[in-house]
Image (tube, helix red, strand yellow):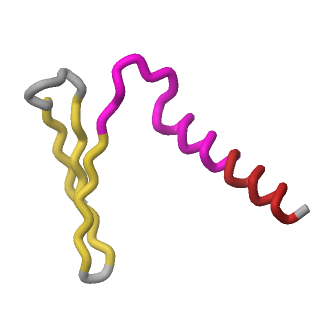
Amino acid sequence: MSTTTTKRPTDKSPVAVREYMVGDTRYIVRATIKDGATEDATAKVRRLIRNEISRAAENNS
């Protein structure tokens, strides 16, 4: 896996570009941070997982 962080030409938000190899497929992922974001990546992933667990529990009831 390799990571490169650059500045976008029209925006001051940093862009993180990562490459992942899964089997014979290479995935290139670009991540940016929205100006004014109120949560970091860890908090967002935690929230998404909790929401998914809640939805799954509601569907199984």
- Residue 37 falls in which quadrant of the image? top left
Residue at 28% over, 64% down: 20
Q: State the image coordinates of residue 48 (x, y, percent, origin top left).
A: 60, 45
Q: Is residue 61 left or right of residue 32?
A: right
Membership of 37 in magenta stretch: yes
Count of all numbered marks drawn on residues in the image: 0
Residue at 34% over, 30% down: 33
Q: Is residue 26 above or below residue 39?
A: below
Membership of 45 in magenta stretch: yes
Q: Is residue 20 above or below residue 2?
A: below
Q: State the image coordinates of residue 25 (x, y, percent, origin top left).
A: 25, 77
Q: Is residue 54 above or below residue 21?
A: above
Query: Split into 4 quadrants, where in the image is the N terminus?
Result: bottom left
In the image, farthest residue toward the top: 36
Q: State the image coordinates of residue 13 (x, y, percent, origin top left).
A: 24, 25
Query: Split into 4 quadrants, where in the image is the C terminus?
Result: bottom right
In the image, farthest residue toward the bottom: 24
Residue at 73% over, 54% down: 53
- Residue 44 falls in which quadrant of the image? top right
Residue at 23% over, 59% down: 28
In the image, farthest residue toward the front: 59
In the image, farthest residue toward the right: 61
Query: Which stretch did the figure color magenta?
Result: 32-50
Q: Is residue 59 left or right of residue 24?
A: right
- Residue 6 falls in which quadrant of the image? top left
- As rendered, which of 9 and 23 lies closer to the eye? 9
Q: State the image coordinates of residue 18 (x, y, percent, origin top left).
A: 24, 53
